[in-house]
Structure formats: C-alpha cells, structure tokens
Image (cartoon, rainbow, N blue to C red):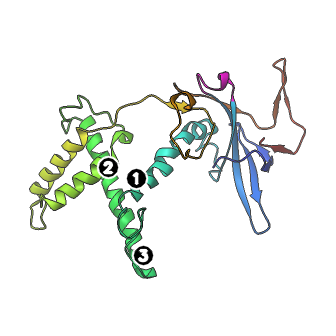
Amino acid sequence: MRIKSDIVLPLLEALPDGSYRSFLADRTCCIPLRVIEYDVKVPGRDNGEDELYALATTLMDWRAYPAAELAASYPDRWNASETTIGQDKSAIIGAGPSTGPMLRSATPHQVIQEMWAWVTATQLLRIHGCRAVLAAAAGQLTAGPRTPAAPAVPDRVPFTVTHREAVRALTQTLAPASASAAALAAAAERTSGRILARLLPDRPPRHRERRTKGRARFPSAASRRVPASTGAATVTVSHAGQIIYADGRTGQATATARDTS
C-alpha cells in the first residue's frame, strides 16, 4: 500500500536493503509494517522530476522480499487488483434491475454461495487463458492467424475474449457431460486457439501526468487532454536513516522518526 504524505511512520530499525521497520497505529490497534521509500523518474513527464513513493507492507522479511523487488512490482497492482476486479465485475452486469454489477441472490446464504461461484468461475477463466499462452510458448499450441507468436505473458490474455469463448463452448455443447477425455481436450484446444488469435498487443509502459482523478462531465477538447509518455520508469530506493547532502556526502540521520512527505 502506498502511504499518504501526511501519515508519519516512525523509524524503528533500518534494514540492509534500504527499507525500515515501522508501525501504523490508531486508538484500537497497531500494525507492524516494513516501509520502502524510493524515487521514481518517468521519461517525458513532469520535466524529468522525481516523485517520492512510500510503500508499506506486512512482508517483514527483507531477504525474501528485497526493497528493490517490491518497488519494481508495485505498478503491477493494476493487473493484480484494480483491473482484475473490474474485469470480474463485468461478468455479473445485467443480473438485476441495476445497470451495474449486481448479484441475483436475495438471502445472505445465497449471496455467499453466489460469491464463491462467481470467484471460482472467473479464476477458472484466467487459469485456462494462462495455460493457453504458456502452452503456445512451449510449442504445444499454434497461435491464431493474426498472432504470429504468443509469448508467455499472461497479461496479454483478454478476459472478455476468454469469457465469450467459455460461453460459446457451453451454449454450443462442445463439451457435454457425456464427452470423453479426448473430446474435452479437443474442445479446450479449440477454445485456446481462438483466445490466442486475439491476444492483447504488447504495449510499452505508458505514463500520464497527475492532473485529475475524476472523469469530466463533458468530453474535453484535444488540447486539454493529459499528455502521455512511454518508457520504463527509473526506481531509486532511498536507504532508511541516511541523509544525502547537496554536495553528495551521506550521513546517518539522528532523528528517531521520519515523515513520508
């Protein structure tokens, strides 16, 4: 989790990888944390200025989870959480009178049962799509005519296409209950081939300046659009308890607590 600049995280112990042990407390509880502070420089954005990140994690073992690896993996939160949840919710739109995601069940027990069924179904779709990409990379499947090569990158598997192909396989009875194992394998291979034919393009990292988080009520003009830049970001981990002076010298901080601002 990225910590806001107005939250103070006391420095309890500086660790060799640059992170430090701290805690987050309120009136009811105290959560032990490990904090990683690092600067991110994105090419072509904000005049090349760095942006300070302060990540808090409950992964306390710095040997198993080095600070540099956690900082590099933080951008994957979009694919691992926000994008994944949004894709999963697209599978239950239209279930009720609301236009947004809505479950059909009306009792608590049925809601819990439907929630588990929904999570299981969406995860099975992702597992099938990932297996298709990995099998193609190993030469066990042939990519579609529009995709000459299928790299082993599960992020390129489109959830919508996988969902539609699963529905197609069920509605067209490609895999009835009485089908043999060979027939099921052949149906799965046909479905995998259709998914591989429509992989998402391999785009470079894209960054936008932070100007607004809310969607405008009216379409903005082209001149008012937030500029975007492409390229890999540079991450520099700041060592806890260390001060870098203007002339490049370094020294140990004497304060027992540090602010993330």
Mark 2: few/some/many CA within 10 Å (<14, 14-19, 20+): some
Q: Count how many numbered circles sit on residues in the image.
A: 3
What number is the disc on residue 111?
A: 3
Q: Nearer the viewer, residue 42 or 98?
A: 98
Q: Of label 3 and label 2, which has the lower sequence position? A: 3
Q: Nearer the viewer, residue 55 or 219?
A: 219
Which secondary structure dominates the residues rendered in magenta? loop
Q: Amino acid at mark 2?
A: Thr
Residue at the spot 77% in from the left edge and 50% down from the top edge: 7
Mark 1: few/some/many CA within 10 Å (<14, 14-19, 20+): some
Q: Amino acid at mark 1?
A: Gln
- The x, y position of residue 174, in whole percent, is 12, 57
Q: Which residues are magenta?
A: 42-50
Residue holding disc 1: 87
Residue holding disc 2: 160
- The x, y position of residue 208, in whole percent, is 56, 32
Q: Secondary structure at mark 3?
A: helix
Disc 3 to disc 1, C-alpha distance: 20 Å
Residue at the spot 19% in from the left edge and 42% down from the top edge: 193
- The x, y position of residue 130, in whole percent, is 32, 46
**Cβ–Cβ under 8 Å for marks 3 and 2:** no
Above or below, 126 against 193 in this view is: below
